[in-house]
Amino acid sequence: MPRKLLLIEDDEAFSRRLQANLRSAGFGAEIAATGAEAMRLLHSEYFDLVVTDIRLPDLDGLAILRRIKEGAENLDPDLPVVVLTSVRDIETAVGAMRDGAADYITKESEKSEIVVRLEHVLEQSALLNENRYLRGQLERQDEFRDLVGESAAIREIKREISRLAGQDVPVLVTGETGVGKELVARALHRTGSHPGGPFVDVNCGALPDENLLLSDLFGHERGAFTGAVSLKRGKFEMAKGGTLFLDEIGEMPPGPQAKILKAIETLKINRLGGTQTIDVGCRLVFATHRTLEEEVRAGRFREDLYYRINLLPIHVPPLRERRDDVAVLARFFLGQFSAKYRNAPRGFDEESLVVLRAYNWPGNVRELRNVVERLAIRSSSETIRREDLERCGVSLEGRAPSPIALPEEGISLEEVERRLVVEALERSEWSQKRAAQILGISVDRMNARVRKYGLTHPSWRVHR
Ligand SMILES: Nc1ncnc2c1ncn2[C@@H]1O[C@H](COP(=O)(O)OP(=O)(O)OP(=O)(O)O)[C@@H](O)[C@H]1O
Ligand SMILES: [Mg+2]
């Protein structure tokens, strides 16, 4: 993706030469000879960087710098500005740095040096963009790991990921809840063509309101709607030079589906209320726990979007269909948790491994990880035994095709439902969304049951 630069300079001979140099260095460079022309271009096109002379026939370069940094007239204050100056104007240039210029360059410099300096500024700005995002993501860092597993299925997935290495094609990752779709997405990012760029994720089902999701994805201009008090960059822009992970794409409402389709087709987006077109400069990875064919048949998912994103599907099978991975994963997680909990057991005995392997794992790898964590906290013995597992609800009973046995004395259906709701919640670390997925109901229906049975959990208070 060539980076686009606006060169504001009235000395035509100079600007033409610099433009030629920049172009051969792979930049797109447009020239504005006056302040007015520059402002017009800034409002109609998207730029990654502005380079401005200080003395211009009309507005001076410092005024343009200040307008951008104040976010006046809907300009983007994060847009980096580099000031061009002559050697005798160094003091003005230093003042410009105080006003928010990213750097200053003297016109007497070698053109090749100018290009290097501008590249550096762009790198800094990309880093800033990424850091802002990563700060919120720090706690998730321990999940940046590799895919563990030795089953044929996992080996095939790893092969597929390396076949796609260095490419930017969109990928759709499917599979039940907890199978490791996000991990696959991160692996695709690390082997993609911009492994150093940001990995930005969006949960397309998490926002209650279509417009919130749109502004999260595409950003908005100031005043685009009530409450849009300042310009906001969307996740597409944040992911520039990296990967945008659109998780739970099957939950996306129709409006955003249409916009995503347009973005994929044109490789361009607009901020809400914005007129400039912005290039989509990121790799797209989608994930869903749903069967999108079914969603298409039911009229909930656009068929054209489905074909667009389903070019390269990667399916992660449920854990019960790749039992070879269970022991490997269990040992891997135990190793991790014993670093965290001091008296954790060292390993599993033979019988417990048999039970682990035979169990159904409706919550897949996430459930296995949770069980191992509980064992690491609770068990005091050196090795984990079958009884330890049973205390965590993992037993051979879990293998029965129907998990519900009707007791001799009978049971009320309501009580059955309540127990299953509680069990699903426990299995999903009290995430109502995941519990709803396990039970195959909507979050709204889950929520209604939680209220009906008066269920509550300390972690819910934090989220509200
Ligand atoms: N192959 C694996 N190796 C190591 N850890 C794994 C593996 N698969 C899954 N995990 C771990 O299991 C947990 C769930 O994985 P992940 O979040 O990727 O699942 P998911 O498919 O995205 O689930 P959901 O549909 O609920 O979002 C995470 O803690 C992840 O690190
Ligand atoms: Mg996920």
Image (cartoon, rainbow, N blue to C red):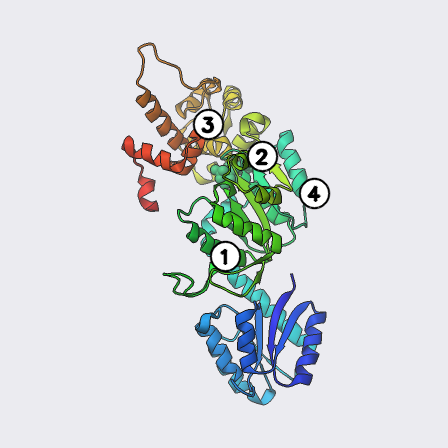
Q: Mark 3 points at which residue?
A: 382
Residue 30: x percent and y percent? Answer: 63, 74
Q: Three-letter amino acid code at disc 3? A: Glu
Left or right: residue 209 versus residue 56 is left
Query: How far apart, in angstroms, are the residues tagged by discs 4 and 3?
Result: 42 Å
Q: Mark 1 points at which residue?
A: 218
Disc 1 versus disc 4: nearer the observer: 1
Residue 154: x percent and y percent? Answer: 62, 34
Q: Name the residue under label 4.
A: 163
Residue occupying image coordinates x 66% and y 34%: 156
Point out the tag, 2 or 1, that comes first from the N-terminus. Answer: 1
Query: How far apart, in angstroms, are the residues tagged by discs 3 and 1?
Result: 53 Å
Judge whether residue 233 can be spotted in this image: no
Residue 274: x percent and y percent? Answer: 49, 64
Q: Residue 316 carries which label?
A: 2
Judge whether residue 409 can be spotted in this image: yes
Identify the residue at the far top of this view.
Answer: 408
Disc 4 versus disc 3: nearer the observer: 4
Point out the tag, 4 or 3, that comes first from the N-terminus. Answer: 4
